[in-house]
Amino acid sequence: MKLSEVSELTESILSNCTICPHNCRVNRVKGKKGFCRAGYRPAISSAMPHHGEEPPISGNRGSGTIFFSHCNMKCVYCQNYQISQELEGAEYSISGLAEIMVGLQNAGCHNINFVSPTIWIPQIIKALQIARKKGLSIPTVFNTGGYDKPETIKMLNGLMDIYMPDMRYSDDEMAKRYSFVKNYVRYNRLSVKEMYRQVGGLKLSKEGVARKGLLIRLLVLPENIGGIKNTLDFIKNELSTDVYLSIMAQYHPVYRASKYPELNRRITAKEYLDIVKYAEKKGFNYGWTQDFISPGSGDDLFMPDFKNKKVFKYYKNNN
C-alpha cells in the first residue's frame, strides 16, 4: 500500500477512532476526545537530539526524539506523566510536525524517534508524506508503550524502520490495575509479532547504529509485577532468542506510585539481576542491560522534566 493510501485510510479511522485497542469511536477530526484525551492536531512537548536511548538508537549524534503528549495508557508510575497525563505540550499542524522531522535530520540525528506515537499514527503518516518530499531519509523509530492493535501496526508496514515496543506486562490484571488498559497481553504480543514479521531482528551499521529491526524493552518493576520471565518465554518461543532486548533498571516511584505500596520503592539489585540471569539462561545473546545503581545515589540524569526547556539533567551538566 502506498504512503498516500495509508494516509487516507488512517485519517478516516480518526472520524470514528479505533486506532488503538480502546476503540473509543469518537470523532477526533471534529475535536471529540476519548480515553487518551487527544484531539486532531498533534500535541508535542519537545523534540531534541536525545542521547539517553539504547546505544544503537542514540549513536554518537543523538536520536531525533519527538515526545508526543497524551497516551493510551495511564500508568500510575509513568516517568513521562507530565506529558502523558498532565498533557504538557503544544499543538502543531501536520506541516509543523514535518518541519520538526526535517530539522532533526538537519541537526545530524541518526533517526526520527516517535515517543508514544500510537494515538498519533494518522498525523505522523501525513507528516511523513510532507517530510519525505523535503528530503527526509533517515530511519524512523516507533517507540511505543505496547498497547497497540496488530491491524494498525500492519498499516505501518514499510513506513517504520525500527520498532521499539515495551512489553510491560504478562498478566492482564496487572495491566488493568496499574495502567488502566484491558487485554494488554493479547494486543501487545500480537502487535510485537507483527512488528517482527515486518522488520525482523535489529540490523546495525558498521558504526553500530540501528538501521532497521525490532528492539524490545523490558522495564523491571518491583515485586515482578510485569511478569518478565513469562514475557521472555513468549519471545523465545514465538519470536527468537536473537531478538535484541533492553532490560531496564531505571524504575522510579513517581507520579501516583506512592498510592500503591508495592510500587512505592526502587527495585533491588536482586530483582534486576534475577531477570538478567533468566534471560541469559534462556539463551538471549543480544541487547543491553543497565548498571544497577542503588536508590539515592544520584542516578537521575535521564529522568525527564518536561516543564524545563532542557528536559534531561545531562544537558545541564554538559553546559
Image: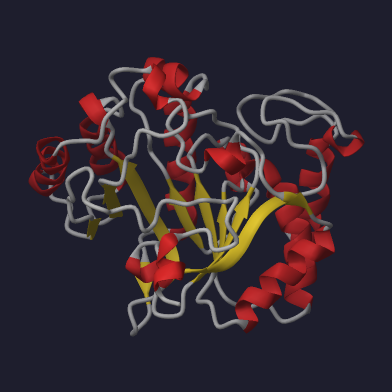
Q: Residue at x 77, y 24 (%)?
A: 25
Q: Is residue 154 above or below residue 313?
A: above
Task: Work out whether residue 159 can be spotted.
Answer: no
Image coordinates of residue 58 in percent, x first then y, are 42, 70
Q: Residue at x 57, y 56 (%)?
A: 308
- Front residue of 290/110: it is 290
Residue at image coords 61%, 48%: 117
In this image, 159 relative to 39: left or right? Answer: left
Residue 272 in the figure: left or right of residue 131: left
How far across and how far down the image is residue 27, in percent? 85, 30
Figure check: 93 above or below 122: below
The reply to whether residue 149 is visible in this rendering is yes
Viewer-side residue, 46 vs 164: 46
In the picture, measured across the screen, residue 202 lies left or right of residue 69, that is left
Q: Position of residue 43 (x, y in %)?
A: 73, 48
| Rendered view: 264 above or below 105 | above
**Residue visible at 32% across and 46% down?**
239
Image coordinates of residue 313 in percent, x first then y, are 43, 61
Q: Quadrant of residue 277?
A: top left
Q: Nearer the viewer, residue 136 or 283?
A: 136
Locate the N terminus and report the quarter of the image it occupies: bottom right
* Quadrant of res 54: bottom left
Judged from this view, the residue extending furthest toward the right is 30
